[in-house]
Amino acid sequence: MIDYGFLDRPGRRVTLREVGDENWREVADIAPLDDQRSHAPAMAARYLLLSMREDTWNSLAVHADDTVVGHVMWGLDDEDGSHGIGGMLIDGAEQGKGLGLGRHLADVVLGTTEAPTGSYVDRTRAARSSDESYDPRREGELWNSVERFTAAHAA
């Protein structure tokens, strides 16, 4: 489990967890709002299939307390070592509850908000993180931890 102590607006603890036997069906059922279907998959099941069938992608369930509320797909490019978020989907019924300000994250991922590695992003503005806040070594350790955390599902 990845837990940074973040609470959504209703006060639920938001965590990222492995997708496994106990939650994969709930993750697969995550669906966007109807008006988002032109730019989001109809259900998170598409992301789960990609992470199961391709070496690059890995899945994490987004939980609010013990309720599955979303899905994040992340990947590692073995050729250049870059990491990225391939998809994020918060269930339509859970949107607007402060589960990660997903549209701002999407803007960073899509390049609408430019944010080089190590940047601090506050909604639509990127700024250089302080030396105390950003450490490239620590970033590498975080990604290594995520890789270990999801290794069982990538195999």
Image (cartoon, rainbow, N blue to C red):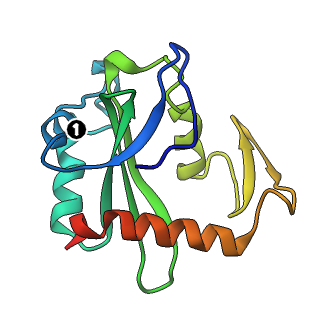
Is 121 left or right of 57, judged from the image as shown? right
Q: Nearer the viewer, residue 35 or 14?
A: 14
Question: Looking at the picture, how far across and down is residue 76, in whole percent?
Answer: 42, 72
Question: Looking at the picture, how far across and down is residue 148, in whole percent?
Answer: 38, 70
State the residue at coordinates (46%, 49%).
Answer: 2
Residue 123 drawn above or below residue 47: above
State the residue at coordinates (41%, 44%).
Answer: 16
**Residue 5's quadrant in the figure?**
top right
Is 40 left or right of 84, judged from the image as shown? left
At numbered mark 1, what does the secondary structure look like: helix, strand or loop?
helix
What's under tag 1, amino acid-wise?
Val
Residue 147 drawn above or below residue 104: below
**Residue 26's quadrant in the figure?**
top left
Question: Looking at the picture, how far across and down is residue 131, in whole percent?
Answer: 86, 63
State the residue at coordinates (22%, 64%).
Answer: 153
Residue highlighted by disc 1: 27
Is 28 left or right of 119, judged from the image as shown? left
Q: Nearer the viewer, residue 20 or 46?
A: 20
